Image (spheres, grey):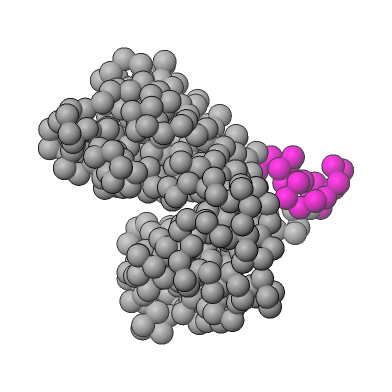
Amino acid sequence: GDATAMLIKSYACQRRTPLKHHNSFLTEALEILAQNAEYNDNEGRSVAFRRAASVLKALPRRVRSMEDLRCLPCLGDHSQRVIKEILEDGSSREVESTRQSEQYQAMKALTGIFGVGVRTADRWFREGLRSPDDLIRTGQQLNREQQAGVQYYDDLQKPVTKAEADVISDVVEKAVHAVLPGAEIQLMGGFRRGKEVGHDVDFLITHPEEGKEERLMPKITNWLEEQGLLLYQKTTRNSYLEKMDGPARASSNMDRFERCFSIFKLQESAASCKSNCSASAEDVSAAHEHHSEASGWRAVRVDLVVSPYSQFAFATLGWTGSKLFERELRRWAGQEKHMSLSSHALYDNKQNLYLRAKTEEEIFAYLGLEYIPPSERNA
Ligand code: TTP
Ligand code: MN
Ligand code: MN
Ligand code: MN
């Protein structure tokens, strides 16, 4: 073991995890096992593999032997066996057979449909269904969300680029300012962490005058709908009440903000079309013929969340991710600090009081953690 390995802390929120690291040949393998455990409703096992993968993402260099893993936290027996096999043989039999398995592939395809969770996908798998096409062919009952998920499946499978996220940011900003001047909009999720592609685009919206943000979402979605920019939307009202939801529920990861899960209709410019098709500038119209549909637009998943100004720092921290980083923050708060952290608030269970914060930096300070910038929260 070397000295650097011994500096790796055990909670992901105590570490800096950059987007690009040196061990994807190991982390991708461990994350397949994590994903498979999730498909089998084994959350404990899934989190164990994800924590192991996350530790390897924080290492300053490529792992070359088991010796390099001495003194590292979060590496259980099973993860170590998998790593050893990959280091010795180039791949792990368990990982490869999981990757090839009918269940893994079907669950991946089915849970890849917007609106389909593990429980539904598992039920369909047991009934012999394997893909979105099977759902259509057998005339499965689908809710409105799942219908949209099946309808736009191909587009929603394509990664969203940063350039597309920037175009959507402009659209969202225009919509929000049309209905509430002075509102503030922030790009969240993977793109805030510096990712170059994502599965969706996440936004957090607030207004410096507390109360102005109430019932804002229907105004935004109406505006977008009038412009013909929405293919699907489902808005949920804010249901957070500090007195009732605060300390008791604060460790739950589902928040209660007014929010909208949507699918945007994104007009594809000649420029983005060109880069997608890798055609020359003069050849843009010819490039269209590469598309299955030469429609000039694509569907993109967009999440909109509205937060009261007083909760904005907590909402920002909670919607930046990564999911494992968030999970580890809440675990650190509870286990090490006797506090409850949510996307709404931080509650100190020893002093029995809420800790107010205007910035993410203040929240890290309350938690006794060194500040980790978004670009290093890629746990
Ligand atoms: P995601 O958009 O699911 O993930 P991501 O942006 O990190 O990655 P991707 O590129 O695949 O989109 O979630 C973004 C953050 O939002 C994540 O940190 C968790 C948070 N979140 C909540 O707080 N509550 C929720 O109900 C959901 C769905 C997400
Ligand atoms: Mn996202
Ligand atoms: Mn999202
Ligand atoms: Mn094109």
Q: Which segment did they paint magenta?
A: 266-286
Task: Please indicate whether residue 87 sits to the left or right of residue 224 in the image.
Answer: right
* Foreground of the two, 307 or 269: 307
Q: Compared to 68, does 232 lie above or below?
A: above
- Identify the residue at horizontal 36%, vertical 82% (top origin): 126
Q: Can residue 28 be seen at all in this image of the molecule?
A: yes
Residue 279 drawn in magenta: yes
Q: Is residue 55 above or below residue 100?
A: above
- Give the residue drawn at x 84%, y 42%: 281
**Residue 149 part of the magenta-drawn span:** no
- Camera sees residue 295: no
Instruction: Using the rendered view, name the quadrant where residue 256 is placed.
Output: top left
Whether residue 146 is situated above or below residue 357 in the rendered picture: below
> Which residue is depicted at the point 20% across and 44% down?
249
- From the viewer's side, name the closer residue of 166 and 299: 166
- At 15% from the left and 31% from the top, the residue drawn is 352
Instruction: Assign the magenta stretch its main secondary structure.
Output: helix
Q: Residue furthest left?
A: 244
**Does residue 104 appear left or right of residue 347 in this picture?**
right
Image position of 196 (left or right of 318): right
Relative image position of residue 107 (x, y in whole percent): 45, 72
Residue 241: x and y in percent read 17, 34
